[in-house]
Amino acid sequence: MSSLTTDVDVVIVGGGPTGLTAAHLCRTVGLSAIVLEQRVGPQRSPAAHAINARTFEIWRQAGLEMGPVLAAALSP
């Protein structure tokens, strides 16, 4: 196991939607953040079966572009 020494304000475990949203929100308020994820790339299938309306509202308020998310969600 390798070690990494760095100074950050927030350590986030998990690079899923919640972890990445948390990292983005940290940056918008001036906090440094690091996301720790065990996988080296995206999962082949999603872990979430649904994303609720409140999540989309938080993403919209955070200034995230929803077009690609909606297109991916609606594609078969």
Image (tube, helix red, strand yellow):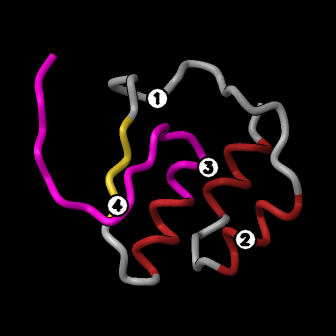
Residue under pointer 1: 42
Q: Choose mark 4 or mark 2, whichever is in front.
A: 4
Above or below, 2 against 28 in this view is above
- Please name the amino acid that badge 4 sits on: Ala
The earlier-in-sequence mark between 4 and 1 is 4
Number of other residues with Cα within 10 Å of mark 1, as a class: few under 14, some 14 to 19, many 20 or more: few
Label disc, if present, on residue 21 of the rendered structure: none
Residue under pointer 4: 33
Number of other residues with Cα within 10 Å of mark 3, as a class: few under 14, some 14 to 19, many 20 or more: few
Left or right, 13 with respect to 5, comes to: right
- Inspect the magenta stretch and tell me whether residue 7 lies in it: yes
* Proximity of marks 2 and 3: CB atoms separated by less than 8 Å: no
Residue under pointer 3: 18
Q: CA distance from mark 4 to mark 1?
A: 20 Å
Label disc, if present, on residue 58 of the rendered structure: 2
Left or right, 48 with respect to 16, comes to: right
Left or right, 72 with respect to 30, comes to: right
Image quadrant occupied by the C terminus: top right
Above or below, 15 against 10 in this view is above
- Inspect the magenta stretch and tell me whether residue 32 lies in it: no
Q: CA distance from mark 4 to mark 2?
A: 19 Å
Secondary structure beneath label 4: strand
Secondary structure beneath label 1: loop
The earlier-in-sequence mark between 3 and 4 is 3
Give percent across and percent down for residue 10: 38, 60
Q: Choose mark 2 or mark 1, whichever is in front.
A: 2
Give percent across and percent down for residue 43: 52, 23
Q: Which residues are magenta?
A: 1-21
- Please name the amino acid that badge 2 sits on: Ile
